[in-house]
Structure formats: C-alpha cells, structure tokens
Image: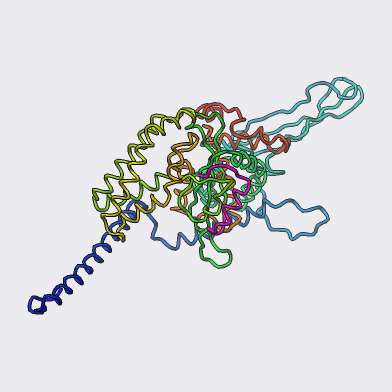
Amino acid sequence: MPRQHDLPEDIDSLKRLVREQQALLLSRDLEIEQLKLQLARLRRMQFGRSSEQLDAQIAQLELTLEDLEASEAALPLPAAATPRIERVKPVRRPLPEHLPREEQVHRPACGCPQCGGELKILGEDVSEVLEYVPSRFKVIRHVRPKLACASCQTIVQVPAPTRPIARGLAGPGLLAHVLVAKYADHLPLYRQSEIYAREGVDLDRSTLADWVGGASALLDPLVEAVGRHVLAAAKLHADDTPVPVLCPGRGTTKTGRLWTYVRDDRPAGSAEPPAVLFRYSPDRKGQRPRQHLSDFRGVLQADGYAGFDRLYGESIQEAACWAHVRRKFYDLHVAQASPLAEAALARIGELYAIEAEIRGRPPDERAAVRQARAGPLLTALHGWMHEALGSISKKSELAVAIRYALSRWVALTRYRDDGRLEIDNNAAERALRACALGRKNWLFAGADAGGERAAAIYTLLGTAKLNGLDPEGYLRNVLERIAEHPINRIDDLLPWNVALPPVTEQRLAA
C-alpha cells in the first residue's frame, strides 16, 4: 500500500491507483478463500500417519513378497513332463501336539460293494488338516478305516475328503480367516504369521501366501459369476479410488486404481440381490472403465470423472450425483460460513427429505412423487443458481461449485423421472469405504497382480455383506464346497443362493 505522502495529486492517477489496489485485494481475497477451502478439505481427510519410515519400508517389502508368492501359487500346476525350477519351500513341520484334536471317521455306508459280505478292519489311513475357529486353532483328524470283506477279501475304504488346496494343510475355515484378515481387516500376512506364532502355531509368511494364491485361483469362477450378475443390471453405481502399489524391482510406489461397480436396487423396492464388482487397474485411463463396462447396457450413476464421458451414448445413460454437488457447498460453508452456500445446502436438503420418505417404494411411485414434489424444487434451484452466479465473482470457489452443478444439470435431474435411480452415488462410495480405510495405513499391494487379487476378494466380501452374510462364514462355506462343485453350477455358490445361519449362530457353531 502506498504511503499517504506518495499518493498522486491528479484525480485520474488516483482513480487508477484505487482500481489497482482493489484488484490486488480481490486477488488476495480469492487466494485466502481457496486456502481456507483446501484447509477444510484436508481437515476432513485427516488421518493419523506413522512417521517411522523404516517400518513403512519394511511393510512394503513384506507385502511385495506376499504378492509375488501368492501369484506363483495361483498359477496352474505344470504337466509332469514339464521341467521346472523347484522353489525351496519351508520344511513341513508336524502339527502341534498341544492343539485339541477332533476325529472324523469316514466309514463305508454298507457292506462289501462286490458281494455284500461283512467287512473287517485291516488298518487305517490318517491325515490331519489344520483348521481355525474364532479365537482358537484345532486339528481335524480324518480317519479312513481300511476294511476287508470276510467272504471275498475285497478291501474297502472311503475316498479321502477333498481339500480346498490340494495336499494343503489349511482347512476351509482357516483359509477364510486368512483371507478376511488380509483383505477386510488389513493385516499383512507377515503380521498374521506373528499372531499365529504367539498361539504356538508356526505358519511362515510364504506358506500363507501360497494359501492366498491357491484360494484366490479357486474362487475366480465365483468372482466372474458375481461380475455377470452386476453387469446384467439396468442401473449401476460406479466410483474409483487411488491405491499405492509398489513398483517391482524399484522400491518406489506408483498409484494404481481400484474401481467399484454396485448393483443395488433395494431402495426402489426390488427383490433382486445386490452385488458389488471390484476391478483393479495400474492407472486411471478412461479406457479402464470402458473395458470393465463393455457388456453393460443401462444407466450409470457416477461422479464427474471425465473418463466416464466416452461411455455415455445410446447404450449407457449418465446419472450424476447430488452428494458431490452438496459436498462442494458444504466445504464452502465450513470454511467461510457463506450465506449462499448455506442457502444451497438448505435447498438440496429438501430434495433429500423427499428421498427419505419414498425409500423402498416401487419405481413408479417414486417417479410420481419426485415429479410432483422434487420437480418444482429443482426448477427453483436451477433459477436460484443462475441468479447467484450473476452476483458473485466468476473466479470464486462458490462460482466453481455452482458451475459444476449447472454443467451436469441434465444428468443431475434424470433421477426425477426414473424411479429406479437414486439421488446420489453413495452406494458406490460405501463399497469403497472399507478399502480406503486399509489404504490409509498400509501399502495396498506389492504388485499389479496383488491389486487384481485384492479386487477379486473384495468382490466376494463386499457382496456377502450386501446380502447380510458374515463374510468369513460365507467364504468358509464356499471353500468347503467349491473344489468339487460343478463349474456349470457355480451360481449355486453366490451369496444369495447360500443358506447360512445368522452371524451369531455361525460363530457359536464354529
């Protein structure tokens, strides 16, 4: 600011100086406004982070090993004649003697299958499977007596029960627990190994990684079945989130992407089962969602990400998200106590109040109510935004928020006339929430293959939860059956086709 004795004497120069100072003040006000807004956003996103860099690096390396070993375990077994380099595996230790034993004897259902004569015991084969139930390990002894016919000497023995992973020590309950701990509870395998060691059970990280890879390969057909169900919907919710992934061999991280596509028509009174499909990609190029949704036809409800734009056309219609619009005004209200932002929030709140009243009703009822009550509110809000835009600086954050809404107005108001649609995209955001919580504390994956495997397991866990099932109980049930289940009947294992007791009963039974 110029000092008083430096002010010009002539009127024109003084006016010019005033205009310059006004422009400078306006520029500073805008900068302050933007900084306050950024600060408000950061405070909302704030999450405690460790400052111990060495521990973080160790965790990243451990995670890389997990993903590499799991990827190897997921590969098909080579033919017998195919030469291969043998990987040094940990020596299999006998299962701890202190663990309780549960014996299951597998006897033939009747007499000699050849002549019907009486069977006598010759001996037995015994194999042990390490199983896990909440809070304790146990060893299940599968005893298969060998019986001989007293008349014709035919030897009879029940076939060995199948295991989820051929020749593996892990029972389906333990496999389910390891998967849920890693992907739902965000416990890396090396930490799980440390926890199990405290219980007197030595399970190397590499062994756990083999189990994760083998189980994920076994579950892949089921994941694809969920995907077919999701993409057959008439309406989907879509969103994505960044995930840190370690670059193999470089020790640095890159930003991959986790995408979610949610089918959930329960708010519109539908009895169709909900489901969620996760996909991983190493980047956020627009071609990724185009690949994921190549078989989808219907309405896509998403945010304003430009990568979705090329999807919209004759086969896919856009429905925008009012929650994203509201969030922009909310940030401004918190940062600046803006009366205009507060007024916008109040108007949007009226739209949400209508949605709360009609949730769960059939689509035709929802559309009728929206047209009668939300329609006039939307028209009034549209006019109010145009009027407000003419009274504020075009460079202000408030103007940016208003232009964001107006530029998407057709997509934002599509829900008014289509009772199948929702007012926002919160279904997709809820699906990503669990993944985002783990991402804040841990490196998401040690390689792209680990990201793809995580997306597959997230698909099953998320879909189980949407259908009211305990994810661990569901995976346990599936892993008990899937090894021998006909591939052409894989849909029988989808969460809505699996009968499980309530969560509390599942845990008591386990």
Q: Outermost residue, left direction?
A: 5
**To which quarter of the image does residue 84 belong?**
bottom right
Q: Is residue 7 left or right of residue 41?
A: left
Q: Is residue 17 above or below residue 197?
A: below
Q: Which residues are magenta?
A: 281-300
Residue 453 drawn in magenta: no
Q: Quadrant of the N terminus?
A: bottom left
Q: Is residue 356 left or right of residue 272?
A: left
Q: Is residue 413 visible?
A: yes
Residue 306: percent from left, percent from top = 49, 56
**Which residue is pictured at 58% across the width and 35% down the height?**
474
Q: Quadrant of the C terminus?
A: top right
**To which quarter of the image does residue 131 belong?**
top right
Q: Is residue 376 left or right of residue 290?
A: left
Residue 159: percent from left, percent from top = 78, 33
Out of 241 and 33, give the one closest to the viewer.
33
**Which residue is pictured at 67% across the width and 51% down the height?**
74
**Which residue is pictured at 43% across the width and 49% down the height?**
408
Residue 298 drawn in magenta: yes
Q: Is residue 98 visible?
A: no
**To which quarter of the image does residue 6 belong?**
bottom left
Q: Outermost residue, right direction?
A: 152
Residue 434: percent from left, percent from top = 47, 45
**Which residue is pictured at 78% across the width and 22% down the height?**
109
Q: Is residue 268 above or below residue 209?
A: above
